[in-house]
Image (cartoon, helix red, strand yellow):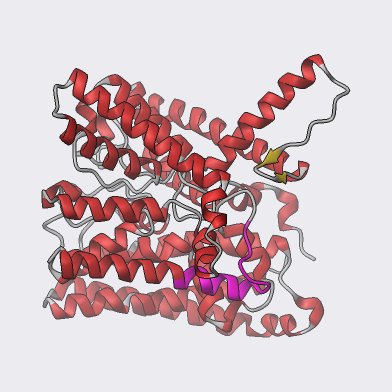
Amino acid sequence: MRIKVVVYYLGWSLVFLGIFMLVPLFCSLYYKEIASYSAFGKSAAITLFIGATLIYFTTKAEKNLRRPEGNLSRREGLALVAGVWILAAVSGALPYHLAGTFPSYIDAFFEAMSGFTTTGATVLTSIEGQPHGILLWRNFTQWLGGMGIVTFFIALFPLLRIGATHLFEAEMPGPQAERLKARIKDTAKWLWIIYASLSGFEFLLLKVIGKLPFFDACIITLGTMPTGGFLHKDLSIAAYDSLFVSSIVTVFMLMAGANFGLYYSLIRHNPRRLFYNIEFRLYITIMVVASLAIMLDLAQNMGQPVGEAFSQATFQAVSIQTTTGFVTADFNTWPSLSRSILLVLMIIGASAGSTGGGLKVIRILVIIKYAFRQLHLAFSPKSVRSLRIGADVLPENIASGIVSLSILYFSALVIGSLIMSAMGLDLLSAFSSVAATLGNVGPGLASVGPISNYAAIPLAGKGILIICMLLGRLEFLAVLVLLVPAFWRWR
């Protein structure tokens, strides 16, 4: 492990994060918010200074990468990805703390980690009273984290030109990072082009047709496409009381939760791949079945008109499964069946290769097929049955990796719930808080429901949930390997 090489690139990541802070800084300047303007100025200066210092003292080590044998190793790639995300939250918390948004740095760190990991869980008790710059920074961090911070660097800068494959694989969600082009840099660039284009399209629809103010359309877009869920309204999307706004947001949440590689196929005039993709079809099927089940439950047990029940059920099901976290209703007051369905959707999550979190639809499918194969082998041990996903045979190493990660996921869910229960949370609050942060969803149930927040969680509990957010976003391995002593051996 060449620590200096990793530190060199961590320095560059801080430099770019410092530059990104200029966006909310100019926003604060435009709205004449002196306190937040000063906070962003100081935060950018501190971040840039630390980044530049790290680069200065490790430049000599980076020169080794210019030799063919100097490529970043897999271990260095994993360490760099985990380090970038942790440092992003550390530096991203500075504006909140310096502006006085959160007197406690832990709360600021919680909010920053929730932003970058696109979780959307907040410890803000009053959102609408915050300065525009702070509100923009919350959602801008989500937009940067949606497609991946490191992936952004790979796509736009020559900084990470060496060893990019390991970085891409460590950060992109899903069982196997999908290449759209032969070169990883080109793949990352296309993903960001699609991501930015969809963001721009949603913004135009909300601004031009929906006639929303510029700031509102921008904030909603920056929370939708990364499936983040932060918003500048205490009541979330319900504050607009607009069928058009909720419908547009529903469509783009649905798109954000699908594999972005499928959109590249549409661009390349291959629509068959979208409609014949088994994960996409299962993703839509789960969404439709869950929406209809919740609609019937609301209509029967709460007496809601069918049209209203359909609208609320569809929006909440899409929002929760894509792990966005926007709400148009307090589903905490819904019948037990509806809440249980939403809790299951939190765990299932979106598609691989999307900006959504959760366990991922493709993994659920593989686990089911794997279980049926084991059931068949129980009475026919000599038979040979390969795992097929559509027309493709799934390699055994990928299948075992999916099973292993699923075990880690549910183990973390159980252990985290027990720890949160030990801190005084009721069973539903404890379980849903872990499920919502581990799946990068945001709102949970009971005391962490859609109209509540995480401010009342004990300090140690917030630390546990911060770890859950990071584990969920980087899908365990890039974080857990840091705890293995052999991982840190020097080369």
Foreground pick, 81 / 237:
237
Decide if residue 108 is on the left or right side of residue 16.
left
Q: Position of residue 215 (x, y in %)?
A: 17, 69
Kindly identify the residue that appears in the image at 79 percent across and 31 percent down.
385
| Quarter where residue 95 is shown | bottom left
Q: In this view, does 83 lie above or below 123?
A: below
Kindly identify the residue that appears in the image at 38 percent across and 45 percent down.
323
Q: Can residue 112 be seen from the camera position used here?
A: yes
Kindly identify the residue that appears in the image at 25 percent across and 31 percent down.
447
| Quarter where residue 17 is shown | bottom left
Magenta span covers which residues? 177-193
Decide if residue 140 is on the left or right side of residue 70.
left
Q: In this view, does 473 lie above or below 20?
A: above
Of all residues shown, which one is farthest toward the top? 379
Q: In which quarter of the image is the C terminus?
A: bottom right
Foreground pick, 204 / 419:
204
Of all residues shown, which one is farthest toward the right? 382
Q: Position of residue 56 (x, y in %)?
A: 56, 85
Residue 308 inside the magenta-drawn segment:
no
Kindly identify the residue that appears in the image at 73 percent across and 37 percent down.
387
Residue 179 inside the magenta-drawn segment:
yes
Q: Can residue 105 be seen from the camera position used here?
A: no
Q: Position of residue 209 (x, y in %)?
A: 16, 66
